[in-house]
Image (spheres, rainbow, N blue to C red):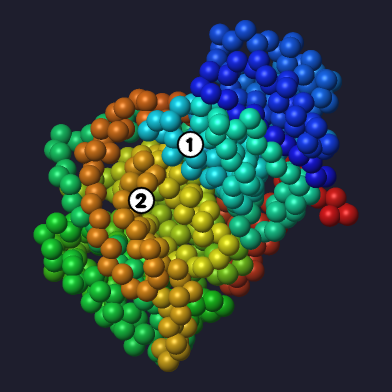
Amino acid sequence: MRYTAACLTDGPTPTGEDWGERITGLSDDYADLQLVVLPQMPGSTDIGIGGLADVARDYKVHLAGAIGSTAFLLSPTGKNLLADAAESYPVVRSNIGDLAVVVGDDVRIHEVVRGHTLGGAEIILNPSRERPDALSGARELARSGRAYENLAALLTASAGGTSGVWDSHGETLVSGGAETDAIATKIDLETLRTSRTAPMLNFPAQLRTKLYAVEYDRAAARAKDWATEPAKPIAPYQVLIAQAHITTVPSVEQADEVISANLDRSLGLAGKFAMQPGIKLVVFPEYWMTGAAFGKSVDDFWPNVGIRMDGQHFARLQEFASKIGSYVGGAIFEYDPDWPRRWFNTAFIINPSGDVILKYRKLQCGDINGLLNNTTPGNVYSEYVQRYGEDGIFPVVDTDIGRLGACICYDTNFPELWRSLTLRGAELIVYPTGEPHNGHRTAWDVAKRAHAAENQIYIASANAGCEAVTPDAPTTFFHRGYSKLIGPDGRAVAVADTGGEVPLVAKVDIEALRRARRDTDLSIIDKIDFDTAAAMYRNHNGFPMDWALEKPTETADEGIKIVLETMARYRETGVYRAPSKAA
């Protein structure tokens, strides 16, 4: 089904006096008009549901909006389809799609939108009333991010702000401010549903709901003191993000030579600046020591090529940290003999004395996209927690440059992970990544910025800038570079706006972050219903835990089969709708 949807736009105090006239104009212009989203109205408005129901009947459209914080969704017969909703995250099944209404600034609370998505929503309607302020950019980021991470369409009708429609890739289809009467675009329901049928990048079906049920059960207690600050203030400092070159290890025989060359090149790049007294943190990219070798054996290749944290190559990083007197972070493809026939994608932080103070093993990795045969903590959750405790899943370390955590590349598509680290106290996330040139590059960038703004954290994002698939191969720019430091308002502090090798230096101000966290107008942590969110994650069967507990992953296609099984379960339970056979 394909139809026209529209959002009305207004000044900061919508009156509704000409809404009927504007909908008349839309009906004249678009014979297939099926859905209209109205701006959020003040709670004291004189406009009543009854009058709006007449409008819905007159124009035979679904009409969505909110009076104060109370959402409504009127059918073409004038019935309020949300009037008797008892669910925490209600979803309306209709002939124009499965719809949910998220009011105003709640779109910045990813748990709310996720709750509607897992309840079956494929179109999120966001009536809003806002003014240009310090959160305007954060709201824009959130709307794009919510659409992308939930594979949903999102429509915002804003009074006083920017209205827009985003597709399931997070791309803006149309936008406009109060200077326009309305914005309109086509909703292609079959295309939207088809976007949910591919297992790769199928984020809702790759979400470990049971893992986050555990996290959110404890979130309310953590939220009480998440913004408390240590007695000792932290002076502003510089972070060096080393956008490095990667040569991929082609064979076991060439491993030492290639890894050593990668280290020589990257440490040489960083070393030019790292001795400056203002540099307190250096961040390298994901898998920059070995490259991302696909299809390699867990029996011979990875035990011999994977980086060991007690090995000679990692020791060079520890020596480098000691030499420059700074913290050093990055990510490696790690082999740990305590986990035979398994390997991990692991982020680390080394302190200025050369000690490893944080080790985070990537939760959302290429194993679920049919690319890698590595192990992730969620896939061996029971044993992993038994060995390292729950804090081993989401480690955060308190240092003299702030509370530090880590995420890696594909993790950016799962906002729950970022929230878990924030609630454990993280103020700066070391984010090694290996992002390529592809159609998702804009959405990944927006998602990172949305996480920074919603959690009020710094993100030091280090990407590789160039690569060679073997030592004798030409250099390419498959890895796009674009490393950056993102501030706690979601804006870029500094960007390497190119590929290639770049030493990017930028300032971190932890005290400014802490002041912003104490500002209740800016923070959303105290606005989240953690108990309701915990129940939501607990009551949905997403990507399973422990699926690789008994046997290590041997081939890259094993994980993607589990995603397909989860998608099938979602179709059976109504979380996803299958496209028509004609589509």
Look at the image and tell me whether residue 539 can be seen. Answer: no
Q: Which of 512 and 41 is in front in this view?
A: 41
Image height of 457 relative to 287, above or below? above
Query: Which residue is identified by label 1?
Result: 139
Identified by mark 1, the residue type is Arg
Quadrant location, the C terminus: bottom right
- Is residue 62 left or right of 168 when viewed as pictured? right
The x and y percentages for residue 265 are: 28, 79
Question: Quadrant of the rendered structure where residue 239 is?
Answer: bottom left
Quadrant location, the N terminus: top right
Identified by mark 2, the residue type is Ala
Q: Which of 148 and 370 is in front in this view?
A: 148
* Circle on res. 285: none
The x and y percentages for residue 97 are: 77, 38
- Is residue 118 left or right of 461 when viewed as pictured? right
* Residue located 75% across and 32% down the image: 26
Look at the image and tell me whether residue 149 can be seen. Answer: yes
Total marks in image? 2
Image height of 495 relative to 23, above or below? below
Image height of 367 relative to 307, above or below? above
Query: Which residue is identified by label 2?
Result: 492
- Is residue 247 left or right of 272 when viewed as pictured? right
